[in-house]
Image: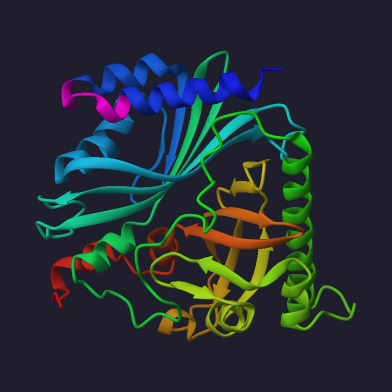
């Protein structure tokens, strides 16, 4: 099995070369670092692509044309063997922001001429020194909000440029103690099992007694947990405010939760990252994000990145393909931008 050091080197070389490439060299660089069977997943409206050319044409070309002087402001980088396939594949996870000057329209979003931040989480699967698969989650809705367009009712959490880890130690370039990564993964899996238990209770699938919301969270989270959710939901802080501003709306305004699993789940040191395609499906019953009930199951493509502090989780950065989720409910946010007044 390939060691994680070489996996990191492969991805860091790609990131360096691509981020510095001239516009007419980006396709060449992407092809140099990827396999001929390269596949790419992106959030709505990009979805799945099966060639480097399509990735450049659909995402990177338009984005880097709209944003001038783009910098990758990375907060977390880790590598690991995939817990979803018995450790048979190796992945990296990079998370942070792309910062640039919003100088031209992008996806129908009007430019501001000011700094804009696009939150991102990027996963790469590596085989034999090449990237064979990528998933790039980015918070398009946050850029819409930065442009002064309020396309949704007020959210439950706070919206701002989310910080990186409180400990400033999220970029893991060197080797890490395997026992620390195992401890992080075990804690995240225990936390996920508690969520599954709660969902079974909510779905009426079990009569086992359930933890109270605070009991459930306090098993795995520090009291001063920080949860950085996507635009449309927002961020929240401390267990009590997380329950009020995210968990309670999520559990009382959405029904029929069906978990579909993850594509990749990796941990290294005190950090863990995973994504699904989709992770779960839910049916809005009315009031979630101020939207009406549809009763129609809709998928949620989700990324979670965690920081463990001791024996509990301390921070969680969450990406959800909100535009895809809303589109599945019949709300095409991008199509309505031209009708939305700027604030």
The residue at 19%/56% (across/down) is: 115
- Residue 340 horizontal side relative to residue 211, left or right: left
In percent of width and height, residue 46 lies at: 35, 45
Q: Dominant secondary structure of the magenta stretch?
A: helix
> 171 above or below 90?
below
- Quarter of the figure with the N terminus: top right
Camera-nearest residue between 330 and 31: 31
> 268 above or below 139?
above
In percent of width and height, residue 84 lies at: 71, 40
In percent of width and height, residue 295 lies at: 54, 77
Camera-nearest residue between 226 and 256: 226
- Residue 56 horizontal side relative to residue 191, left or right: left
* Residue 131 visible here: no
Q: Residue furthest right?
A: 208
Magenta residues (range)? 18-24
- On whether residue 22 falls in the magenta region, the answer is yes
Kindly indicate the quadrant of the structure image that contains residue 180.
Answer: top right
The residue at 57%/18% (across/down) is: 6
- Residue 136 horizontal side relative to residue 217, left or right: left
The residue at 41%/58% (across/down) is: 324
- Quarter of the figure with the C terminus: bottom left
- On whether residue 174 falls in the magenta region, the answer is no
> 158 above or below 40?
below
Task: Specify the color scheme.
Answer: rainbow
Kindly indicate the quadrant of the structure image that contains residue 282.
Answer: bottom right
* Residue 22 visible here: yes
């Amino acid at each position: 099995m390939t060691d994680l050091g070489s996996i990191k080197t492969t991805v860091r070389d790609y990131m360096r070369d691509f981020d510095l490439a001239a516009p007419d060299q980006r396709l060449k660089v992407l092809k140099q670092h990827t396999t001929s069977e390269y596949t790419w997943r992106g959030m709505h409206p990009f979805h799945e692509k099966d060639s480097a050319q399509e990735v450049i044409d659909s995402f990177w070309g338009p984005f880097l044309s709209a944003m001038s002087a783009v910098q990758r402001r990375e907060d977390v980088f880790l590598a690991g063997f995939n817990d979803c396939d018995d450790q048979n594949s190796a992945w990296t996870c990079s998370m942070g922001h792309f910062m640039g000057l919003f100088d031209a329209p992008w996806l129908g979003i009007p430019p501001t001429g000011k700094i804009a931040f696009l939150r991102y989480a990027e996963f790469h699967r590596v085989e034999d020194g090449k990237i064979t698969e990528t998933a790039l989650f980015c918070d398009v809705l946050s850029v819409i909000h930065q442009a002064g367009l309020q396309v949704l009712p007020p959210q439950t959490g706070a919206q701002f440029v989310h910080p990186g880890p409180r400990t400033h130690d999220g970029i893991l370039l060197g080797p890490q103690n395997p026992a620390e990564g195992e401890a992080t993964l075990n804690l995240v899996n225990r936390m996920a099992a508690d969520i599954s238990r709660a969902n079974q209770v909510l779905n009426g699938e079990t009569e086992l007694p359930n933890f109270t919301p605070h009991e459930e969270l306090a098993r795995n989270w520090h009291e001063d947990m920080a949860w950085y959710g996507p635009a449309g939901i927002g961020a929240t802080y401390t267990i009590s405010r997380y329950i009020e501003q995210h968990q309670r709306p999520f559990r009382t305004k959405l029904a029929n939760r069906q978990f579909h699993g993850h594509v990749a789940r990796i941990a290294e040191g005190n950090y863990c990252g995973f994504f699904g395609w989709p992770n779960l499906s839910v049916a809005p019953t009315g009031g979630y994000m101020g939207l009406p009930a549809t009763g129609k199951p809709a998928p949620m493509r989700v990324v979670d990145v965690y920081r463990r502090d001791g024996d509990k989780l301390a921070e969680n950065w969450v990406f959800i393909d909100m535009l895809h989720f809303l589109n599945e409910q019949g709300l095409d946010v991008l199509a309505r931008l031209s009708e939305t007044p700027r604030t």
